[in-house]
Image (cartoon, rainbow, N blue to C red):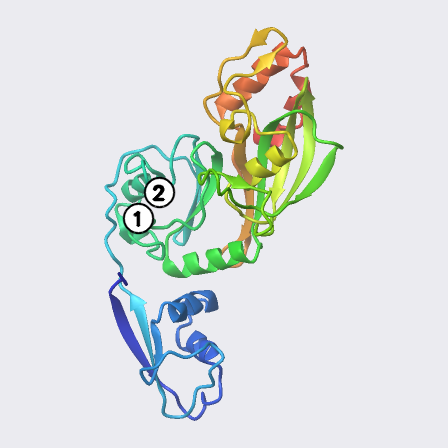
Amino acid sequence: MRAPAEHSNFLVSAEDAGQRLDRFLTAQLPDLSRNRIQLLMDDGQVLVDGTRKKPSHRVTLGETVSVGLPTRTASTVEPEAIRLEIVYQDAELAVINKPAGLVVHPGAGAEKGTLVAALLHHFKGGSGLSSVGGPLRPGIVHRLDKDTSGLIVVARTDAAHATLAADFSKRLVEKTYLALLHGRPQGKSGRIDLPIARDLNRRSRMTTRRREGREARTDWRALAHLGNFTLVEADLHTGRTHQIRVHFSALGCPVVGDTVYGAPREERVGKRLLPPLERNFLHAARLAFSHPRTGDRLKLRARLPSELIAYLRVLAEATETPATAFDAALGPYL
């Protein structure tokens, strides 16, 4: 069901005649990005004299362009007093350091205890968050998996949401993760260019083994080795579902704790069985992007969670690796 909308009408003047429809609307609605306008057109919310037109349509004198802007719908998610670690916040956006175990938005099997519920409580309801994502995803521009911790951007206005979403789509956002892998990938650094698609046999998984996969690129650098484990820094150049997890699994080096993609639930070093991590050793440690209003470059970091630091120390002891092997490499994230 299409959300209710408020309609605005614009009469094409002699001065505007001949412009592309999308550029005409960009001038009439300066608070909306061209990407947002394209979404409205795709949704049938833009009509020229009552008829849908392509963005390339050249408007003519006397035509009436009607635009339906969806009205804000109250969120159906109940606010919950869940603690949030806010790394950055202003009138347009917020950046949260999400803990592992917290689902971003409600979905199958996760109706309560979500990041959205926490945001609604912190911002005193949906009025402090963008409405672009609909009543179940207010403010949500992108996602992190439940068992991945780290930085996630939240939009507080619809204009900021449209700009941020466009920047993510255009790959203008720098995203750096820390991961602990089984095994040792070949070399000190590398690039993984493997397309990613849905696994047809297990729908909850992704795979690199289908031709129909979407382009995906992950660049990585080894920071330290602890026995037969490797601590890496990985830069995402695309944002496919489970990208880092499925890419390293394809190399035969799954992320520690990631039982979905081949890691054991408990690690063994020699005869020593390590305590289960109870999450993936994957952390969104750094984000860099342009502020949607000022254009200033924001560069933010999230410290490595205490449970991951503790796990590294246990692993270092078990593998007889000096703690200095990873302390120096993780300096900016400790």
Q: Which residue corresponds to the image point at 35% horizontal and 71% vertical from the top-left?
A: 44
Three-letter amino acid code at disc 1?
A: Leu
Circle 1 crowding by C-alpha within 10 Å: few under 14, some 14–19, many from 20: some
Q: Secondary structure at mark 2?
A: loop
Tag count in the figure? 2
Which quadrant is home to the N terminus?
A: bottom left
Label placed on residue 97: none
**Residue closest to the far top:** 271
Of labels 1 and 2, earlier in sequence is 2
**Which of 329/108 is in front?**
108
Label placed on residue 136: 1
Residue 120 shown left or right of residue 208 in the figure: left
Q: Which residue corresponds to the image point at 67% horizontal and 38% vertical from the top-left?
A: 220
- Mark 1–mark 2 Cα distance, whole angstroms, equals 7 Å
Cβ atoms at labels 1 and 2 below 8 Å apart: yes
Q: Quadrant of residue 11?
A: bottom left
Percent x, y for residue 125?
A: 26, 47
Q: Quadrant of residue 123?
A: top left
Q: Is residue 89 visible?
A: no
Q: In the picture shown, does residue 3 fall above or below 331?
A: below
Residue 260 shown left or right of residue 332 in the figure: left
Q: Is residue 34 visible?
A: yes
Residue position marked by numbered label 2 in the rendering = 105
Which quadrant is home to the C terminus?
A: top right
Q: Which residue corresponds to the image point at 43% horizontal and 93% vertical from the top-left?
A: 14
Percent x, y for residue 223?
A: 68, 29
Percent x, y for residue 211?
A: 60, 50
